[in-house]
Image (cartoon, coloured by chain):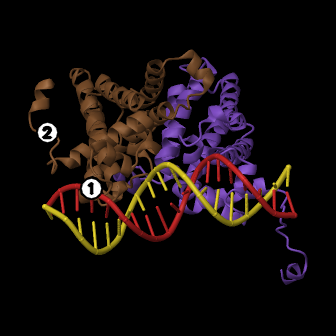
Chain colours: A brown, B purple, C red, D yellow
Amino acid sequence: MSARRSAPQRRTYHHGNLRSALVDAATGLLEAEGQVGVTLRGTARRAGVSQTAPYRHFRDKEALLAAVAEEGFRDMVRAARRAAARHGDDPVAAVRAMAIAYVRFATTHPSHYRLMFGPSVRGSAHPSLRQAAATAWTDLTGAIVTAQSAGGFRAGEPSALAFVLWCSVHGLATLVADEQIPPAVRATFSVEQLAEHAFDVVLAGLTPVS
Amino acid sequence: MSARRSAPQRRTYHHGNLRSALVDAATGLLEAEGQVGVTLRGTARRAGVSQTAPYRHFRDKEALLAAVAEEGFRDMVRAARRAAARHGDDPVAAVRAMAIAYVRFATTHPSHYRLMFGPSVRGSAHPSLRQAAATAWTDLTGAIVTAQSAGGFRAGEPSALAFVLWCSVHGLATLVADEQIPPAVRATFSVEQLAEHAFDVVLAGLTPVS
DNA sequence: ACCTGAACACCGTTCAAGT
DNA sequence: ACCTGAACACCGTTCAAGT
């Protein structure tokens, strides 16, 4: 660290990867102070550049937020894939692990999760964000197709089954992120218990009638 | 209307119910332009008073938003009760109608729904808002208790069963409000179909094993 | 190409002042 | 009690200018 001191300034004037530095700065503000705390000027300040420098890399504030949201989707998908991979032998357990990973992301990064799904960034205007979001959806659908083939889920349009599960996952995740769990429920159950219980009910509803 | 012209100004100087006029003005802005369009100054402008007049009735902007959110909960609960009352003879159908009414509210008032459940107003700081929100929750729980007694739902902690259903309802409602229905799903199903399908799966999971 | 400072039109909020 | 205008410290965004 003190060795760095004598070296030429690491944050050079034309500093090369300002774009990713801005995304990091904005993410830091988001996690620290929530979405209201994310300001274009504040992000620039945190990155050590003038207030107008971000406009070299982002058309406007929404474009910066879109980049932050996109990173969130990548992180969430990565975590879900890791969780699912631990259940390669049990496709239903893999779906379950994936769903729980999504909820865990919302629990640990509530502001980020809200940004990803909220109205501040219209995905339609940001193709690479839409793409990253679509990955989360196709991952879940794919896992369900696998579980269907293995006989763990009942037959039917995969996207319809995936959507039912996704409603539960997203509902629980947003309730957690927004701290809207009814007090009576919160007092009795942990988030983990709620997630497992909710998915067990949905999975029971999706089980083959046999 | 022209008769009014000659009468003394209806919007009197000290205008008596400025509080509810401000709530109405803010609600109008919310529905017209979304949450970013709701501004304290703009609300005052719309109500025809100075920018600082709202501070006589609301501690700050959040208090105004809390009042708007509270009205939203009242409207939503009223609609859900009407819907449930049409199925007085079938407790499970009543629960279903209630859930669908919540989703319909989110569909028709997306910005309002987001405000009610989002982070802009911390319910903890606004008791009467928290109270109005609790009514939606206790209504749903009560309907489920009734359905349990009638044998339509399996036994168990009512708030746990209610929460599972609530996750699905809220998940679907926020996906609709935020226009986040995956394109493949949106192209194939209507919101009504999605709601019915989602609840049928959850209700199947909550049915007595008999 | 990349970054800057000054400027514009907006905010939320406070304060002294008016009736 | 209720409302006002001026002021302060912030925004997002634009523009002419600097290297």
Q: Which residue is mark 1?
A: A53
Q: Which residue is mark 2?
A: A9
Left-right relation of B43 to B107: right
Find the residue positioned furthest to the right: B7
Q: Residues within 10 Å of mark 2 (few under 14, many from 20)?
A: few
Q: Looking at the image, which residue is at 24% across and 59% down?
A: A56
Left-right relation of A192 to B203: left
Q: Is residue B206 visible?
A: yes
The quadrant holding residue A146 is: top left
* Image x and y of residue A181, in percent: 56, 28
Tag 1, which secondary structure? helix
* Image x and y of residue A77, in percent: 27, 35
Q: Are marks 2 and 1 on the same chain?
A: yes
Q: Looking at the image, which residue is at 53% across and 17% down?
A: A189
Camera-side mark, 2 or 1: 2
Q: Chain of mark 1?
A: A
* Image x and y of residue A72, in percent: 31, 39
- Residues B206 and B121: in front is B121
* Image x and y of residue B52, in percent: 69, 56
Mark 1 and mark 2 in contact (Cβ < 8 Å)? no
Quarter of the image with the C terminus of chain B is top right
Tag 2, which secondary structure? loop
- Residues B197 and A99: in front is A99
Q: Is residue A136 visible?
A: no
Marks 2/1: CA–CA distance: 19 Å
Q: Looking at the image, which residue is at 33% across and 46% down?
A: A45
Q: Chain of mark 2?
A: A
Kind of residue sitting beneath label 1: Ala
